[in-house]
Amino acid sequence: MTIDTKDILNSILNSISRIDYIKTEEIPNIDLYMDQVTTFMEEHLAASKRHPEDKILTKTMINNYAKNRLLPPPTKKKYSKEHLLILTFIYYFKNILSINDIQVLLTPLTEKYFSQENDIKLTDIYEEIMNLELSQIEPLAKDVTRKFKKSQESFSDINREESEFLQKFAFICMLSFDVYIKKQVIEQLIDHMSDPTN
């Protein structure tokens, strides 16, 4: 492994170890106006941006989510803690799922737990999900390392310049295949949720 190759892997592993999420105690206990919501989300999810100029959420996005019933409408133009939790789920899901799939997934959640008197609060669900996800960081880092090392063993019998490109390509393909398979599984589960007879 060259120094450059080690740097790539270390950079990837560092970014995985820095994965963060919005903690429920960071969410204000007062309802927020739209500008306050976008500012809050921007500040707390900035580390997940690919480019500095990328937007986490815009007013238009939030209005569209409410219009498409992904997000319950605000009360007197104010958004509650529950709105912010749902927006966080939407933010993560929108990178891999269609709006229709997100709606199938979130509608039962918002109907049963959004501002309802229930033994289980939306906050409890969110915290449990985030704890489950954070527990996957170490196994995920190990899996990425394994795939990286495997890709570095490929194309080793050709010149260095070509092999470096093809090894990176192989690594991206291995990661993409993993995402593709998991996306297929997610879509099957969502299809079953929308039509249990499937």
Image (spheres, grey):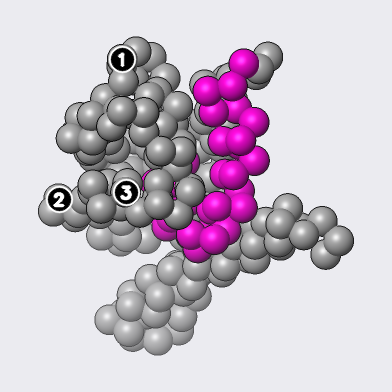
Q: Amino acid at mark 2?
A: Pro
Q: Residue at x 33, y 75 (%)?
A: 164
Q: Residue beneath label 3, please?
A: 63
**Quadrant showing the N terminus:** bottom left
Residue 142 visible, this angle = no
Residue 166 located within the stretch drawn in magenta: no
Q: Secondary structure at mark 3?
A: helix
The residue carrying mark 1 is 30
| Chain part drawn in magenta | 88-117
**Label pair 3/2, CB-CB below 8 angstroms:** no
Residue toward you, 150 or 158 = 150
Q: Where's residue 7, x and y in %? A: 28, 52
Of residues 157 and 148, the one drawn nearer to the viewer in this rendering: 148
Magenta stretch prevailing secondary structure:
helix
Q: What residue is shown with label 2?
A: 52
Which residue type does callout 1 highlight?
Ile
Question: In what quadrant of the picture does the C terminus appear?
Answer: bottom right
